[in-house]
Image: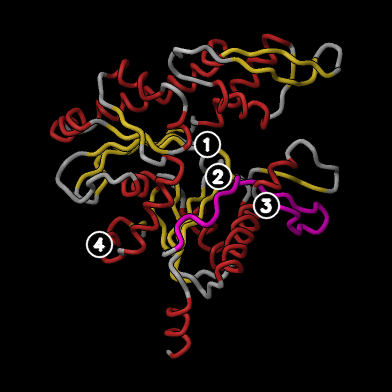
């Protein structure tokens, strides 16, 4: 009993957004203390971690045979349980060392429809890293809380959380999800579309990090007022030598059009399947975009044009999920009902 009270005094609440592209950690009283790519590098023979986060991301496509650098989450789900455990443990350990946390209570955001096996893998990873009283929350619910939507009121609020691996659309009212859908098309698909475009049009291979840079720098979902372009280096498929080409925003937009259309269609489908009264609320107050995909230029304008809906982007879309999870954990009596059993 004495030890339990001591842990409760010394430990601090911690929230985690375990995303396909990035993992974020929030600590009560400190805010977001970690924002790292969801990448881990390990020694192949021993399985010991070499690097995680930004450092591990630099290893992608550049490692020697003795090191494996990988994204352990794919399309919003855990693709490699062992690597995910290593990554989560390293991230939590870093934060605990820096903040001096003892047995933190933890709330973790997970995709809609996560399986029991995946839930157990996430919880076990957090337990191995020294967390206690581990709870789970669906990412769209956390994003809605973080974006300031009135989820407690009898009004329909629509959140569209576009991450790296999944786009999650949810209509929420009175702490409950009236409709939700998760499609495994999001930021990563847009990145891969750019890689395919350069291979098809220019017969040139570019890496994942390069394609992501193109997406961030000149990618868009709607025609831009000011044209953008950038030079991109890769490997010539025919001659096998280095090559540089100039890409412009129009061709990148065309390359990304298929995954963008899937995202728009998921919003259309959600609106069509939402009960009439709640749909009326959404039509009146609009929807909110969260997640890294919300930052794709012109996506809000495209959705407005295609669906005739008002759209706003969350104040800080990249941190909406982890901030919402942090708020829920700080006000656990109010929000416990939205946690996943």
Mark 4 lies on a secondary structure that is helix
Q: Earlier in the sequence, mark 1 or mark 4?
A: 1
Q: Can you say whether 44 is above or below 233 in the image?
A: below
Q: Is residue 280 left or right of residue 63?
A: left
Q: Are marks 1 and 4 in contact (CB under 8 Å)?
A: no
Magenta segment, prevailing SS (helix, strand or loop): strand
Quadrant location, the C terminus: bottom left
Q: Earlier in the sequence, mark 3 or mark 1?
A: 3
Q: CA distance from mark 3 to mark 1?
A: 17 Å
Q: Residue at x 62, y 62 (%)?
A: 94
Q: Residue at x 34, y 64 (%)?
A: 330
Mark 2 lies on a secondary structure that is strand
Image coords of residue 68 (percent x, y): 76, 46
Q: CA distance from mark 4 to mark 3?
A: 35 Å
Q: Residue at x 60, y 15 (%)?
A: 229
Badge 1, how many Cα within 10 Å: few under 14, some, many 20+?
A: many
In the foreground, 304 or 199: 304
Q: Can you say whether 250 is above or below 177 in the image?
A: above
The residue beneath circle 3 is: 52
The residue beneath circle 4 is: 334
In the foreground, 66 or 119: 66
The residue beneath circle 1 is: 164
The residue beneath circle 2 is: 22
Q: Earlier in the sequence, mark 2 or mark 4?
A: 2
Q: Does residue 280 belong to the magenta stretch?
A: no
Q: Which residues are magenta?
A: 30-51
Mark 3 lies on a secondary structure that is strand
Q: Does residue 32 belong to the magenta stretch?
A: yes
Identify the residue at the far bottom of this view: 2
Q: Is residue 154 left or right of residue 100?
A: left
Badge 2, how many Cα within 10 Å: few under 14, some, many 20+?
A: many
In the foreground, 83 or 220: 220
């Amino acid at each position: 009993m004495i030890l339990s009270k001591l842990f409760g005094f010394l430990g601090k609440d911690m929230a985690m957004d375990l995303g396909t592209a990035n993992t974020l950690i929030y600590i009560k009283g400190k805010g977001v203390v970690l924002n790292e790519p969801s990448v881990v590098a390990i020694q192949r023979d021993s399985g010991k971690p070499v690097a995680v986060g930004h450092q591990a991301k630099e290893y992608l496509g550049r490692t020697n045979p003795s090191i494996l650098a990988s994204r352990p989450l794919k399309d919003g789900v855990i693709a490699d349980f062992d690597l995910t455990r290593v990554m989560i443990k390293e991230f939590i350990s870093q934060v605990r060392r820096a903040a001096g946390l003892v047995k933190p209570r933890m709330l973790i955001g997970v995709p809609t429809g996560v399986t029991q096996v995946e839930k157990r893998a996430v919880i076990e990873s957090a337990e191995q890293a020294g967390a206690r009283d581990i709870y789970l929350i669906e990412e769209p619910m956390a994003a809605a809380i973080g974006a300031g939507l009135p989820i407690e009121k009898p009004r329909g609020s629509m959140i569209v959380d576009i991450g790296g691996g999944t786009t999650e659309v949810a209509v929420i009212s009175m702490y409950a999800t009236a409709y939700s859908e998760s499609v495994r098309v999001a930021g990563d698909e847009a990145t891969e579309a750019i890689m395919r475009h350069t291979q098809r049009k220019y017969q040139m291979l570019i890496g994942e990090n390069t394609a992501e840079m193109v997406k961030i720098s000149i990618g868009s979902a709607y025609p831009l007022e000011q044209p953008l372009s950038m030079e991109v280096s890769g490997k010539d498929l025919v001659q096998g030598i280095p090559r540089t080409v100039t890409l412009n925003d129009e061709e990148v937009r065309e390359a990304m059009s298929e995954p963008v259309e899937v995202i728009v269609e998921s919003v259309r489908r959600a609106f069509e399947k939402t009960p009439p009264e709640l749909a009326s609320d959404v039509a009146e107050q609009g929807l909110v975009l969260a997640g890294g995909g919300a930052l794709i230029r012109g996506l809000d304008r495209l959705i407005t044009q295609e669906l005739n809906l008002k759209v706003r982007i969350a104040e800080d879309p990249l941190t909406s999920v982890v901030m919402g999870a942090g708020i829920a954990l700080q006000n656990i009596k109010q929000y416990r009902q939205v946690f996943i059993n």
